Image (cartoon, rainbow, N blue to C red):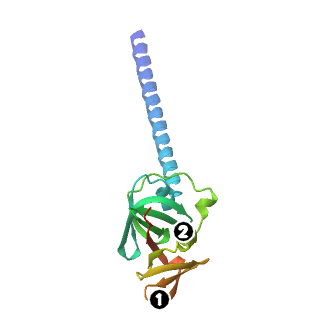
Amino acid sequence: MTAMTGEHDDLVRALEDDLAALAAADADLERDAEVAERTRIERSAVTLADRLRGAAAQVRLTLVGSLDIAGAPTDHGDGWVLLVDGRDEHLVLLAHVVLAHGLGPAGPPASSALDRRPPGSVLRRWCRDRSEAALRTADGATVRGLLLASYADHVDVRELHGAVVSIAVAQLACATRRAALG
């Protein structure tokens, strides 16, 4: 009977070990599932602007109308990014981005007043510098000329033939200027 009790005890210990291993494996699966869910939740809060802030190198953006713009992100604000490619500066309104290539992980969270600047802040600087630019609207129209004035929601451009046209900033997909040579 002692041999049977010993075998029984060994069987009970083996079952207990199996149950403990199953419980540990189940806990590992639950932890992995929780980590995966938290990652999905964190990612769902990351915006395109966040990823552009974190980009360490050149990115390529395809805008509505199949316009491709490439450059290194050098500035950003509320709903826009400034890409620099050689001497060209591209003010891109993120609402008109269809595809983005070369994004990295999210950058630091937007928290300062600089992060909340409207695209007009760049357009005002370009107006002050008396810059010529090519402005591409969301519907594919391109206006080229001298930037005259940037208002709350539109910018005035003197076209090459002399006419002044006002463009709604919300409908602007991209504005490109050739930076002055230093």
Amino acid at the residue labelled 2? Val
> For residue 117, what is the image quadrant?
bottom right
- Is there any visible trace of residue 27 in the rendered image? yes
Image location (x, y in percent) of residue 35:
49, 44
Quadrant of the rendering where the C terminus is positioned:
bottom left
Amino acid at the residue labelled 1? Gly
Q: Is residue 56 above or below residue 122?
A: above
Query: Crowdedness of circle 2 by 10 Å Cα count: few (<14), some, many (20+)?
Result: many
Image location (x, y in percent) of residue 161:
43, 89
Image location (x, y in percent) of residue 4:
40, 14
- Cα separation, mark 2 vs mark 1, equals 23 Å
Secondary element at tag 2: helix
Residue pointed to by mark 2:
122
Q: Is residue 27 above or below residue 106?
A: above
> For residue 89, what is the image quadrant?
bottom left
In the foreground, 151 or 32: 151
- Name the residue located 44 percent from the left edge and 33 percent from the top edge: 22
Quadrant of the rendering where the N terminus is positioned:
top left
Marks 2,1: beta carbons within 8 A = no
Q: Is residue 10 above or below residue 34?
A: above
Query: Crowdedness of circle 1 by 10 Å Cα count: few (<14), some, many (20+)?
Result: few
Residue lying at the far right in this picture: please name it.
113
Residue lying at the far top in this picture: please name it.
2
- Is there any visible trace of residue 47 in the rendered image? no
Sequence-earlier tag: 2 or 1: 2
- Left or right, 11 with respect to 117, comes to left
Image location (x, y in percent) of residue 87:
40, 64
Secondary element at tag 1: loop
Identify the mark at residue 162; answer none if there is no mark: 1
Which of pointers 2 and 1 indicates the residue nearer the eye? 1
